[in-house]
Amino acid sequence: MPLVSFTQLFSKHLFDIPLPTKSDCWCRECGGPIEQEQAVQKEYGPTWVDEGIIPYTGSSVVCPACIALSRGSTTRSIILPPQGTVLLASFSMVHPKPGPWVRAFTDNDQSVKKVEVYPESITLIDFLERILPNIEAPFGVVYSERGANNKKHFLRYVPVNYDKHTINIYVMPSFTYANIQPEKFLAAYHDSLELVSLSPAKLREAYKPIAEKHNLNITEARVLYRYFYTLKNKEDDANEE
């Protein structure tokens, strides 16, 4: 089987779109392989603004997965994971489960809420500790640093991982990438956990030497700091209750 894109992995679970078995051509929007008979010539309207950032402008065709996902304008915010949590897809699993999101997507049901799409959340640490050791490659991960509305497509830009020693995650809503080495990232997390009770300013200062001790790169350090900030906000909210 050829290398596939995250869009194709995601759509396999949500829309039962089969993964391509050969690479006759390549999708201009997600970069994934396409079997010739499945290639779609897509006409772009005046609202199309992603031409400068799609991965393969040298192609003139689009895969069925990207065609399907491009229709979901009302679901771009509710599919974004809650703050501090992840969305993921591999050959054998997907999170969140299709139900409510597909209903919102296919029926344009704007009454569907994010809490219905994510009745259970997987935090970044949960993913690294519990799911990553057992997940099969290839897989892709979207991490939400903060809750936000999102009007843009982002699934087509999620990187696909074939190795677990260093993983590349897509960080929203900043539309950025972060390379993480799970072993040292988790070591730094457990070494810093007691800092959550500090004020934001003291947390920032106390965290710096721990990040340096574990030799976190700049994106690892930023992602972990933002994760602690999320934990702190949740702790403050709980104390107020």
Image (cartoon, grey):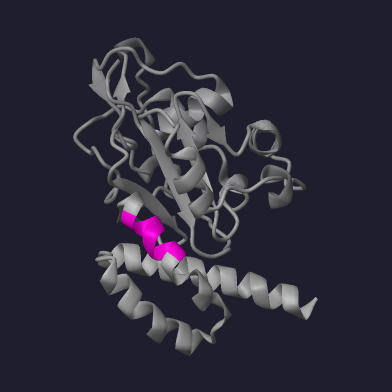
Residue 238 vs 4, above or below: the answer is below
Q: Nearer the viewer, residue 174 or 191?
A: 191
Residue closest to the far left: 58
**Does residue 40 appear anywhere in the picture?**
yes
Judged by its main secondary structure, the magenta piece is: helix
**Quarter of the view holding residue 148:** bottom right
Residue drawn at (63%, 50%) of the image: 78
Residue 10 vs 216, above or below: the answer is above
Q: Position of residue 10 (x, y in %)?
A: 48, 32
**Does residue 50 appear anywhere in the picture?**
no
Residue drawn at (65%, 33%) of the image: 102
Residue drawn at (49%, 66%) of the image: 227
In the image, is 92 to the left or to the right of 42?
A: right
How many dots with numbers? 0
Q: Position of residue 216 (x, y in %)?
A: 28, 65
Instruction: Name the image quarter holding the N terminus.
Output: top left
Q: The magenta stretch spans which residues?
A: 184-190
In the rendered structure, does residue 159 fall within the stretch colored magenta?
Answer: no
Residue drawn at (44%, 71%) of the image: 192
Q: Position of residue 87 (x, y in %)?
A: 52, 44
Q: Position of residue 54 (x, y in %)?
A: 30, 44
